[in-house]
Amino acid sequence: MAVRWNCDRCKVSVGRLDGEGSALPGTWTLVDGVTYCLTCSRARAADAVLDALPETTSREDRFRFRRNALIAFELDRTPAAPDRVIAGACRTSPKTVAVVRDELNLPLHTAESTTPHPV
């Protein structure tokens, strides 16, 4: 357990107010010894897709690939979350999330949950 956790990408820092050690926050990731906050994990998922695209890819297609990468990241992170929750996290529509969920052959969650999900 660490007293403070620091995102290696954006340098944001989190910890307990009482200065006690704490486990890595549930929305953070640790990859090969490098720590990322949720915002940076999302950005890394989008960047990986954009970096793989040819330079000739149109701006509209780059936007679509980035959006779909963010949705796929969120679906992987919280697969049971309703489409409306994923849409809110990705700043898109639930219909777009449903399309990506279908493309990834993930089960469709039609019942809206009353349990809050981390975003």
Image (cartoon, helix red, strand yellow):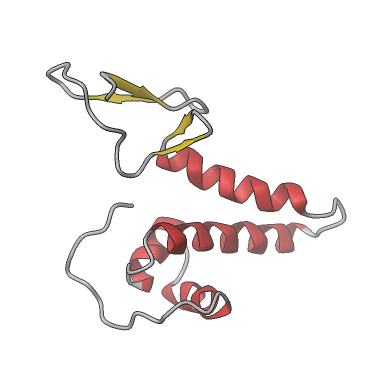
Figure label count: 0
**Identity of the residue furthest to the right in this view:** 56
Point out residue 80 in the picture as x, y percentages from the top left corner: 33, 69
Q: Position of residue 115 (x, y in %)?
A: 18, 64
The residue sitting at 45% across, 22% down in the picture is: 11
The N terminus lies in quadrant: top left
Placement of 69 over or under 97, stated as above or below: above
Rendered location of residue 69, percent (x, y): 58, 59
Q: Is residue 91 visible?
A: no
Q: Is 17 placed above or below 95 here?
A: above
Left or right for 72, reference 55: left
In screen coordinates, is 115 left or right of 104? left
State left or right for residue 59 relative to residue 85. Answer: right
- Residue, x 34% and y 79% (percent of image)? 109
In the rendered view, does 87 fall on the left or right side of 64? left
Residue 107 visible within the image: yes
Q: Quadrant of residue 62?
A: bottom right
| Residue beneath the point at 68% across and 53% down | 49
Task: Residue 83: name its quadrant.
Answer: bottom left
Using the rendered view, name the quadrant where residue 28 is placed.
top left
Residue 48 in picture, x, y percent from top left: 66, 48
Please name the residue shown 49% across and 43% down the image: 41
